[in-house]
Amino acid sequence: MDWLGFTIVILCLLVSGFFAASETALTGASRASMLRLSKQGNRDADVVSDLLDMRERLIGALLLGNNIANISASALATSIFTAWFGDVGVLYATGLMTALVVIFAEVLPKTIAINAPDRIALAVARPMRLTMYVLGPLLRIVEVIVRLLLRLFGLAGEHQAILSPTERLRGAVDLLHHEGKFEKQDRDMLGGLLDLRELQVSDVMIHRTEMMMINADLPPEELVREVLATEYTRIPLWREKPENIIGVLHAKDLLRAIRAADGDTSRIDVSTIALPPWFVPEMRPVSEQLKAFRRRKTHFALVVDEYGEVEGLVTLEDILEEIVGDISDEHDVVVAGVRAQPDGSVVVDGSVPIRDLNRAMDWHLPDEEATTVAGLVIHEARSIPDRGQSFTFHNFRFRVLRRERNRITALRISPVPREAELEGARPKRAGTSF
């Protein structure tokens, strides 16, 4: 009879271990992995997904089954030891069952499950579904009691996540990079893709001060020379004043016109071959602009502000570079906008976008209030600094190296400890001359 009792105790411990492993595996299983396996035809993955959709009832079934098994094993072991040793047998049973439950019904199965949650979840999915069906009536009673208690304490309501799905995905990518499972380039690409909805066209456009434009009233021969001298294939044309853009000249269309004129450039009228300009607002989200490029089957748009004035231009390449980084071809002019120095500082052109600097140096300078490095310094200083002035903010020291009229053209940026930033916080607005 005692051997039968011990056999039942062991079976209860095995059942308890099963529920403990199931709890760890099912709560730690990746829903993304289950969805992927489900699309590949794995039926067990479908069961896991269904169980995760009923998370509240699943947890109830796990805890209920686990506690029933543990309490039954402890009660039976206590009765056996009491029959053997009398009242002191309660102490023996308590010590032995505590050790057995902790090791074999909790720590061991949960450790196994946490090392392979997806695999264990697939293995226990069907038994757990059967368990939930058998314990269904009891689980409904437990759910009603729990919800009444939650409502009594004012805790009822839907779960609200702290982070949005995009932020959670971004956090997962950063974690994989931190663990060494993602290279920096892969992390930057996925991060750039997630940023598209948060960026506006003004964040990725080429500013009008850096645009290459040609006067449409130039003599045809000179205009052709200007087009051939540039590395771009699409060039805005203006007339009377640079703000008055009348069209966009494509180099291929110009070459076709030259061939049609038998090489006589004086017979070419660029206004007849130029494409009509496409104007887009600067506040349009980059993700929408990408869709618009694909819908219109064009790669070039002019960006205007709320008053209709041209602010710059944006191309499909500019948006793709936000995802994959800089794209250079054999005609691009290589300009070193970020130059690392032996002392650990970095010399940066003022026109370098903050996002490009962050991507190149793996920094986290804010880009909400300014697009370029020079714009960030002006925003923080609340003035246009003079050459030689230095400022400390965001754990970096910025020193102005060159200034041309009202533009900061070069800066030296050095990382500084947090304590140094706090000490320099008071004079940072006025600047320090060297």
Image: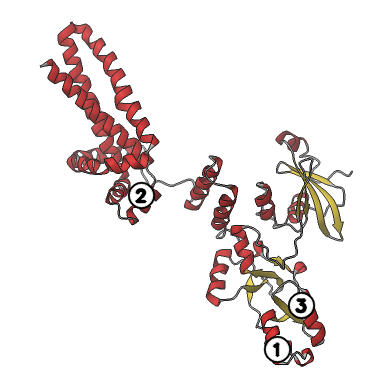
> Residue at 37% of width from left, 30% of height from top?
111
Q: Position of residue 328 (x, y in %)?
A: 68, 63
Q: Position of residue 69 (x, y in %)?
A: 22, 28
Residue receiving disc 1: 259
Are the residues tagged 1 and 2 within 8 Å (C-beta)? no
Amino acid residing under circle 3 = Leu
Q: Secondary structure at mark 2?
A: helix
Residue receiving disc 2: 34
Q: Is residue 250 visible?
A: no
The circle on residue 228 is 3
Disc 1 packing (10 Å; few <14; some 14–19; many ≥20) = few
With respect to residue 175, does 253 lie above or below? below
Quadrant of res 404: bottom right
Q: Earlier in the sequence, mark 1 or mark 2?
A: 2
> Residue at 25% of width from left, 33% of height from top?
64
Q: Position of residue 248 (x, y in %)?
A: 69, 80
Q: Quadrant of the C terminus?
A: top right
Q: Which of the two marks, 2 or 3, is nearer to us in this view?
A: 3
Amino acid residing under circle 2 = Met
Quadrant of res 63: top left
Left/right placement of residue 349 relative to residue 253 reads right
Left/right placement of residue 27 relative to residue 357 reads left
> Residue at 63% of width from left, 78% of height from top?
278
Amino acid residing under circle 1 = Arg
Q: Secondary structure at mark 1?
A: helix
> Residue at 76% of width from left, 41% of height from top?
344
The circle on residue 216 is none
